[in-house]
Image: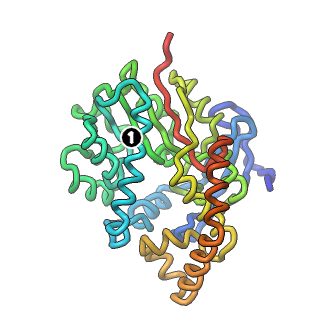
Amino acid sequence: MIRSNPSDETCMLCGSKTISRFSAGPLDYCLDKSFSINQCLGCGLGKTKEVKSEDLNMVYEDGAYDPKENLSHKLLRPMLNFVESFKLAYLHQTQEKEGALLEIGTGKGNFLKIALDSGYDAVGIEPSTRSYNIAKAKLGDRVFHCTLEQVTNNSQLNKEYDHIFLWHVFEHLNDPEGAVSIMKALLKPTGTLIIAIPNFSSNQARIGGKNWYHLDPPRHLSHFTPESIKLLLDRNGLRIKCIYFDSFFQNFLGEIITIGNLVLPHKNILLNFLRRNKFYFIKKSLRSRILNLIAFILLTSILIIPVLLLTWANQAMGKSGTMIVVSEGKTK
């Protein structure tokens, strides 16, 4: 249900009125705090409001993001690397099959390693200290501990790229328009910008609300619709070649976890278990954790076929939980 808010603002993209949709907190239990999720009535852009720097420090450096590769990651690594390799398909859609690539928000460096092994002259930046340390151990001087704003001050990074790649990073940025301006300056005239982001106009988002897996406040500061990302890129001199809604793993994961979040009292159960999330373990009793995990497994086993069909249907309609936006510099 959409409600009016006395502190309504105007959208930074289209100037339309924004309203408060609901309040939501992180589903990994690392903060006992909710944030207002506002949405523009024009282009649909969503914003997480009233986020403080200490909130971000908590969720990134002290929160439930994995500080290292734990046993579950090691066991799942072959499958996760297989999923990572599918990201190359969006690079291969462009004319330049290899060339210089900048990954913004490289995380633990898994995709960057695959890109290097596939022939790309790839480098990555990662502002999170603990993620950077993991990536650095894998990739050495191919990873830089800095923000996007600091790239232009680094002589090794400040050059033109054939590809700039952001996989579920753009929604984390405090100033998306400023980021687009920087990235456009770093792209070759024929270069491509590839951005994977959650889809705020998806059926997942509409039904899930504050329980939507891909909402993730306060880490996710902006919540884009196809219309709002088109508007942002267009007004900054980039032309969208295509928006893909076919990131099946992300979409299916979002469907099944969102359904679990709506039905069960514990949230993001599977991920909180696999990550051995200390906040979840502290705040929920062993008995309740086990009961909720069993319930989630039973729910998934019952719904797996319908949810698979739902994921395919939402992708076909352009209403999937995530989207991949491929753009290039405008041609005259």
Q: Visible in this render: residue 296?
A: yes
User: Which structural element holds mark 1?
Assistant: helix
Question: In the image as oriented, which residue stretches furthest toward the front?
Answer: 305
Q: Amino acid at mark 1?
A: Leu
- Residue 200 shows in the view: no
From this viewpoint, which residue is outermost toward the bottom? 287
Left or right: where 306 falls relative to 284: right
Q: Residues within 10 Å of mark 1 (few under 14, many from 20)?
A: some
x 48%, y 45%: residue: 173
Q: In this orientation, which residue lies closer to the viewer: 312 or 219?
A: 312
Image color mode = rainbow
- Could you tell me residue 127's position as x and y percent? 35, 50
Q: Is residue 278 left or right of residue 69?
A: right
Q: Position of residue 293 (x, y in %)?
A: 55, 79
Which residue is outermost to the top? 332
Specify the quadrant of the image occupied by residue 316: top right
Foreground residue, 111 or 4?
111
- Quarter of the image holding residue 72? bottom left
- Residue 309 drawn at (x, y percent): 65, 55
Residue at (34, 48) in percent of width and height: 111
- The x, y position of residue 202, in whole percent, is 67, 48
Query: Where is mark 1, residue-wise?
Result: 88
> Residue at point 30% right, 42% down?
115
Residue lying furthest left: 140
